[in-house]
Image (cartoon, rainbow, N blue to C red):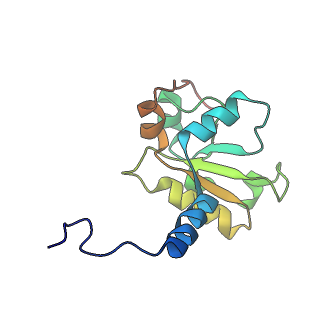
Amino acid sequence: MPSPVTRIPPATSHRALERFQSALEFETDCWDVHASMQSDAKDFVLLDVRSPELYARGHVPGALSLPHGKIGASKLAEWSADTVFVVYCAGPHCNGAHQGAVRLAQLGRPVKLMIGGITGWTDEGFDLATGDAP
């Protein structure tokens, strides 16, 4: 009798490759964001899409505060149309990053989600910055 893990057989390697490779088009992780923020290769804009109050309590260093409900064409006007945005929220229990990603995609902007959000960031041992948005 198969275990609960193998009761449903895994996908073929070809299907698995398609699925997992496509996931990387939509998301990045805290380690990759941290490494990019520490280097000169920062080729994206990191958006904290939570409330300004939560941003002030603690955010990823270098992130800009732009609550997902405020994302609109006028707020993005200072960036070129091909600017990549990376969004995050509180963590796996929050869908704010998904809402922000939807709004950016609706505006034709390239977007990725930082999986884990603030929870993932601190779980990895990375520090948060505090203070209000500039």
On the image, the x and y values in percent for residue 3 come to: 19, 66
Left or right: 53 in relation to 60:
left
On the image, the x and y values in percent for residue 27 come to: 58, 55
On the image, the x and y values in percent for residue 47 come to: 63, 44
Taking depth in this image into account, of 50 and 32 the one nearest to the observer is 32
On the image, the x and y values in percent for residue 2 come to: 19, 71
Left or right: 97 in relation to 7:
right
Q: Vertical placement of 4 versus 77: above or below?
A: below
Which residue lies at the image location 69% right of the left edge and 36% below the top edge? 36
Point out the residue furthest to the left here: 1
Quadrant that contains the N terminus: bottom left
Point out the residue furthest to the front here: 1
Which residue lies at the image location 83% right of the left edge and 59% below the top edge? 81
Quadrant that contains the C terminus: top right
Taking depth in this image into account, of 77 and 7 the one nearest to the observer is 7
Q: Vertical placement of 126 versus 90: above or below?
A: above
Taking depth in this image into account, of 6 and 98 the one nearest to the observer is 6
Which residue lies at the image location 46% right of the left edge and 26% below the top edge? 125
Left or right: 118 in relation to 62:
left
Q: Vertical placement of 54 versus 5: above or below?
A: above
